[in-house]
Amino acid sequence: MALLADDRLFPTEARSRAMARSLYETVRSLPIVSPHGHTDPRWFAENQHFPDPAHLIVVPDHYIFRMLVSQGVPLAALGVPSADGSPVETDGRVIWRRFAENYHLFRGTPTRLWLDDAFQNLFGIDERLSAENADRAYDRIAECLAQEDFRPRALFERFGVEVIATTEGALDDLAFHRAIKESGWSGRVVTTYRPDAVVDPDFPGFAANLVRLGELTGCDTGTFAGYLDAHRARRRFFREHGATATDHGHPTARTASLSAAEAAALYDRVRDGHASADEREQFRALMLTEMAKLSVEDGMVMQIHAGSFRNHSGPVAAAFGRDKGFDIPMPTNYVDALKPMLDVVGMEPGLTIILFTLDETVYARELAPLAGVYPALRLGPPWWFYDSFQGMKRFREQVTETAGFYNTVGFNDDTRAFCSIPARHDVARRVDCGYLAELVTTGRLDEDEAFEVAHDLTYRLAKEAYRL
């Protein structure tokens, strides 16, 4: 029994569905360009066999364990490592059984679609996962993972990945990226500069991180001018390891433009630990503008991921650390928030700033009008909670009429779940083809244009936007 319907996600009206099929056939096998994500470069550097099925699929994926936690399954029971080394479940088969007996929880979610895609198309499983067949599925996946053509590099090639970008912190030594390059393997894996640890005063260890930044670069991070020079140096180091983009995960999209004296004084208060909450937010705002100015200097694409209340559960963060499924979307303002930065760099034709949001109410009201006029702005695809059929459809419906297709940047999967990458890109291709088909059948787009746009959304826009 096939787990997936051939016409999944296509329109139900016959003419539109036929058009969607035709469009999809021209893009379904195009190479995957994955310009932003969180896969581990160590996988590709060392090319070791993946661990057991549970530690490949369940333990690292917050989409999976947050749903299970919501139904009372403890993180420790799912093998998620604790912050202090307290014991957690380590038996992969036990973890997998807990996952399988709760598989019904994922009905109707994008996670279910991604998982079924991987089970069917990667591991050859043709029965829905359940408590009854948990061991059978586990053994099948484990058997596959032991084979040579299931090592990370082989899967990279099987998935048709042309290039994948990982994300590393500003203080990372990029040793695994260096090892990939020195190995002679032809797969293209590049890094992305993520400076949150040294631009967010609320980041754990911020003061020590500034000291380390100075040590790595030989710049005097005791002054604001030296601190900016340290960023220049690290960005240059990242570019030497293939980076074409930076990434900024801020709680808000607020930006600020200050005089040199004001910026230096604010930095001194932040560095010394004496800044108020508003001053810490002002510093984050200032640094978005300063990072945009640095992107004008060095040509790196800038991504702003705003609007997530990170680590909402204090007890979970204390017990298991950051990024354990308790990040929650918040209302986010972009019109007022971005104006200080846009007044400085918004008309720069050589600058690309890609905006992401977890607040869908701003698509038509704020983001599409902004990207539809400022040369520097582009809209990133639906992110995180909205990386889904309905989320992608809402995105196209709300932004296209104002921003068009060419002020968007195609699709990126933003994942650390390696086996889900082909499924996520396939979902995006199907949704886009369905949307284009409806434009054709309602007389809003010519058929020949739809085929060209389908190719652009699948492949060209991502390559060009991220300069890959």
Image: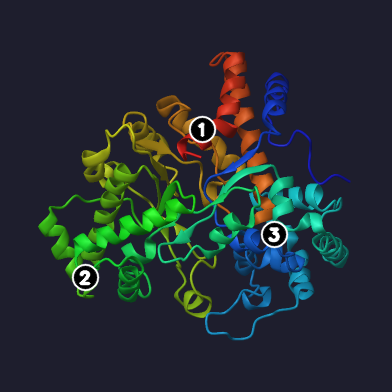
Amino acid type, mark 1: Leu
Residue on which disc 2 sits = 222
Which secondary structure lies at badge 1?
helix
Q: Quadrant of residue 218?
A: bottom left
Q: Residue at x 59, y 86 (%)?
A: 86
Q: Residue furthest left?
A: 261
Residue on which disc 1 sits = 461
Which secondary structure lies at badge 3?
helix
Above or below — where is 337 with respect to 406?
A: below
Query: Percent x, y for residue 291?
Result: 30, 51
The residue mark sitting in front, 2 or 3, is 2
> Is residue 62 in view from this perspective?
no
How many marks do you count on the picture? 3
The residue mark sitting in front, 1 or 3, is 1
Q: Nearer the viewer, residue 357 or 157?
A: 157
Amino acid type, mark 3: Leu
Amino acid type, mark 2: Gly
Which secondary structure lies at badge 2?
loop
Specify few, some or many for label 1: CA neighbours under 10 Å numbering under 14, 14-19, or 20 or more. many
Earlier in the chain: of badge 2 and badge 1, it is: 2
Residue on which disc 3 sits = 105
Q: Nearer the viewer, residue 268 or 360?
A: 268
Earlier in the chain: of badge 1 and badge 3, it is: 3
Label 2 – label 1 distance at C-alpha: 41 Å
Q: Is residue 354 left or right of residue 88?
A: left
> Is residue 229 in view from this perspective?
yes
Mark 2 and 1 residues: CB-CB less than 8 Å, in contact?
no
Q: Residue at x 41, y 51 (%)?
A: 246
Above or below — where is 218 with respect to 411?
A: below
Query: Percent x, y for residue 302?
Result: 38, 46
